[in-house]
């Protein structure tokens, strides 16, 4: 795992050139409550409209959110959508060179009650012609880049002229392809495609035959993404490797391929092997499909996803960064603390109820010294590391921090959890008033959870000693 941490840490020094079909993704969201009297169609009462970078733009956005350096080349029209794309790129601090040719590609999605009802496209798919200025800029940035992404949506940006221009940089190129242009990808570093695209390219339904045939034809490494089946990698040397999916729940697959190719390119630029890059990208894609619409995965999210099971036990600095990131995403933070010496059913039910009150459950765990001060000699029965590991094994517990202080005021003031949980054997007057004032200082909420009668560590210890 230390190796993966090092690779992610080098994302910030990785430079990626993205060339491809740039699009504006528009979203119209609203409520659906009735059928139109004019025709048998749903009426969507629009409540929200917003736009995002699509196509090659979403690839570039993912690179930036993952901490890498990027330069984007694409085509837009002299129209309102093109102006909006430029505004979004500027807002996201994404450097770009945009050629004006035809009209800007737009994809507009109608969303009703969280479900996509309709998509309508506006596009100019004629082959685009590079100006001399554009050719010079592309070659300049190709020399600068560690890796080059070709984001091909078959809308005219990727042509034989462009690929010939990049002929001296082929082993830097990673392609997100369209089958109609497969002849353009010969000799590149890696081509990433999905099962449908691989079947179209090879004429084979069997994934092993398809991957091997495409690898032989293009003379490059091949990665086939397979949804819930994970990813299959066909190396240029003839090896085949399968990587399982890390998706928890599929919400929206829009832009997942963009996230995958952005992450793979950054990882390879950061010194990862193909296997390591694919594993990291699989985690990033898992995050993307759990989100609504076109989504740029952040490095913090990726680190949290990859290390959450291994790194539930964290220090204060790590926990502070995680909590701030969750808060930016609108997650509700729940905090509780205690000794949790001999874990029993009372503890489990208490923690389950605590988790129901928010999204992220953090446990402040008393250190061994502080337990002795609270409970006396002979306690704890289990040391702090063992107690933390046992708590970390509970799926509904997100993070544990071991603290030596007698009270948790310091942690409350730094992390500002939305809800502070205590057992029902406390009330506002019985609980520590310093901690109470800390919570009230930022308008946090204090909740008391009923305990399971007759279940306590002290009772268990007493019975054992008798």
Image: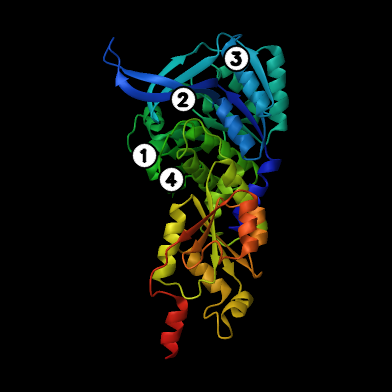
* Front position among marks 4 and 1: 4
CB within 8 Å, label 4 to label 1 = no
Instruction: Give the CA separation, mark 3 to mark 2.
Output: 24 Å
Q: Which residue in the structure is indicated by mark 4?
A: 247
Q: Which residue in the structure is indicated by mark 3?
A: 82
Residue 433 coordinates in the image, percent (x, y) = 62, 63
Q: Which is nearer the N-term, disc 4 or disc 1?
A: 1
Figure label count:
4
Q: Which is nearer the N-term, disc 4 or disc 2?
A: 2
Element type at mark 3: helix
Q: Which is nearer the N-term, disc 1 or disc 2?
A: 2
Dot 3, how many residues are within 10 Å of its Cα: few (below 14), some (14-19), or many (20+)?
many
Residue displayed at 55% across by 18% down: 159
The image's mark for residue 57 is none
Examine the rendered structure and indicate whether residue 296 appears above or below residue 277: above
* Front position among marks 3 and 1: 3
Question: Is residue 111 visible to us here?
Answer: no
CB within 8 Å, label 3 to label 2 = no
Q: Which residue in the structure is indicated by mark 2?
A: 178
Q: Which is nearer the N-term, disc 3 or disc 1?
A: 3
Element type at mark 1: helix
Please name whichever residue, 388 or 157, is drawn nearer the observer in this view of the structure. Answer: 388
Q: Which residue in the structure is indicated by mark 1?
A: 207
Which image quarter holds the N terminus? bottom right
Instruction: Give the CA separation, mark 1 to mark 2.
Output: 17 Å
Instruction: Give the CA separation, mark 4 to mark 2.
Output: 25 Å
CB within 8 Å, label 4 to label 3 = no
Dot 2, how many residues are within 10 Å of its Cα: few (below 14), some (14-19), or many (20+)?
many
Instruction: Give the CA separation, mark 3 to mark 1.
Output: 39 Å
Instruction: Give the CA separation, mark 4 to mark 3.
Output: 34 Å
Instruction: Give the CA separation, mark 4 to mark 1.
Output: 21 Å
């Amino acid at each position: 795992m230390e190796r993966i941490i090092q690779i992610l840490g080098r994302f910030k020094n990785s430079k990626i050139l993205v060339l491809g079909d740039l699009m504006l993704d528009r979203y119209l969201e609203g409520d659906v409550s009735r059928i139109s009297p004019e025709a048998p169609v749903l009426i969507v009462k629009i409540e929200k409209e917003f736009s995002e970078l699509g196509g090659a733009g979403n690839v570039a956005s993912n690179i930036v959110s993952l901490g890498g350096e990027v330069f984007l080349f694409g085509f837009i029209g002299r129209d309102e959508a093109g102006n909006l794309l430029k505004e979004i790129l500027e807002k996201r601090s994404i450097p770009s060179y945009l050629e004006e040719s035809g009209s800007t590609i737009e994809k507009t999605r109608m969303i009703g009650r969280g479900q996509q009802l309709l998509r309508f496209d506006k596009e100019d798919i004629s082959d685009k012609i590079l100006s001399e200025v554009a050719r010079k800029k592309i070659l300049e940035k190709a020399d600068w880049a560690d890796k080059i992404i070709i984001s091909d949506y078959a809308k005219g940006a990727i042509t034989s002229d462009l690929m010939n221009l990049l002929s001296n940089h082929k082993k830097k190129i990673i392609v997100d392809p369209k089958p109609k242009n497969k002849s353009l990808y010969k000799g590149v570093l890696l081509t990433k495609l999905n099962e449908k695209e691989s079947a179209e390219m090879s004429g084979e339904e069997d994934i092993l035959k398809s991957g091997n045939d495409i690898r032989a034809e293009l003379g490059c490494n091949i990665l086939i993404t397979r949804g819930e089946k994970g990813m299959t990698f066909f190396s240029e040397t003839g090896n085949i490797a399968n990587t399982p999916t890390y998706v928890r729940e599929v919400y929206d697959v829009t832009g997942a391929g963009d996230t995958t190719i952005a992450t793979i390119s950054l990882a390879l630029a950061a010194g990862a092997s193909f296997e390591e890059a694919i594993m990291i990208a699989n985690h990033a894609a898992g995050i993307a499909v759990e989100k609504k619409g076109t989504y740029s995965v952040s490095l913090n999210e990726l680190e949290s996803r990859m290390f959450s099971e291994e790194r539930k036990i964290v220090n204060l600095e790590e926990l502070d960064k995680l909590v701030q990131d969750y808060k930016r995403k609108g997650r509700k933070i729940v905090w509780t603390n205690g000794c949790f010496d001999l874990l029993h059913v009372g503890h489990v039910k208490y923690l389950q109820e605590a988790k129901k009150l928010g999204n992220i459950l953090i446990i402040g765990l008393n250190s061994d010294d502080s337990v002795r001060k609270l409970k006396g000699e002979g306690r704890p029965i289990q040391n702090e590391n063992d107690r933390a590991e046992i708590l970390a094994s509970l799926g509904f517990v997100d993070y544990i921090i071991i603290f030596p202080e007698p009270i948790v005021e310091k942690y409350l003031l730094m992390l500002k959890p939305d809800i502070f949980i205590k057992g029902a054997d406390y009330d506002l007057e019985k609980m520590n008033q310093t901690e109470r004032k800390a919570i009230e200082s930022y308008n946090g909420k204090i909740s008391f959870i009923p305990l399971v009668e007759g279940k306590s560590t002290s009772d268990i210890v007493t019975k054992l000693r008798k």
